[in-house]
Structures are given as structure tokens and as C-alpha cells.
Image (spheres, rainbow, N blue to C red):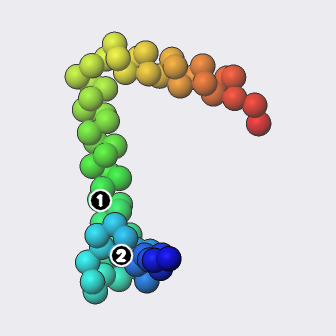
Amino acid sequence: MPELSEGPERPDRAYGAPEGETETERRRRRALFLRELAEARALRDRVQPRRAKAARLRHALRMRTFRW
């Protein structure tokens, strides 16, 4: 029976992190990514206001029906 591979030794290497990257660099890269993602979402909301409004209403409905 073939042996199962255990995957990468470090979990941060699983997503293509550079070899000598520190935790601070990873956090900085992640913060930049999240900033750009929020900016892209804001742009999409400005360009498609009807779709953005529908998404806000769906989210509000989900939050109202969610049980804590």
C-alpha cells in the first residue's frame, strides 16, 4: 500500500508563501490583499448600485433569520 504524503512541513508554505518570509511580512501582504479586496468591492458597489442594494437586502434578511 503506498504511503500517504503528509503535505508541506509549514502550513504557510501551502499557499505559495516565499521561502524566507517572516510573520510580519505575511501579515503586511495579507493586509494589502484585504485592502485591495475591499476597494474592489466598493468599486463594484458604485458601478452596480442595484445589485449592491439587492445584496445588502439579502444579507440583512440572512442576519435577521440567523439564530444565535
Q: Quadrant of residue 8?
A: bottom left
Question: Which residue is denoted by mark 2 in the rendering?
Answer: 13
- Would you place residue 15 above or below residue 63 in this image? below
Residue 24 against residue 30 in the figure, above or below: below
Q: Give me the residue at 47% from left, 79% from top.
A: 3
Residue that appears at 53% across and 25% down? 59
Question: Real-space Cα distance between discs 1 and 2?
Answer: 19 Å
Front position in the image: 61 or 11: 11
Left or right: where 38 falls relative to 56: left
For the residue labelled by badge 1, is the local secondary structure a helix, a strand or a loop?
helix
Residue 41, image x, y percentages: 31, 36
Report the residue marked by disc 1.
32
Question: Which residue is rendered at x = 28% and y = 86% of the image?
Answer: 20
Q: Is residue 18 visible?
A: yes
Q: Is residue 28 visible?
A: no
The local secondary structure at tag 2 comes to helix
Res 21 → quadrant: bottom left
Q: Position of residue 60 (x, y in %)?
A: 57, 22
Q: Quadrant of the C terminus?
A: top right
Badge number at residue 22? none
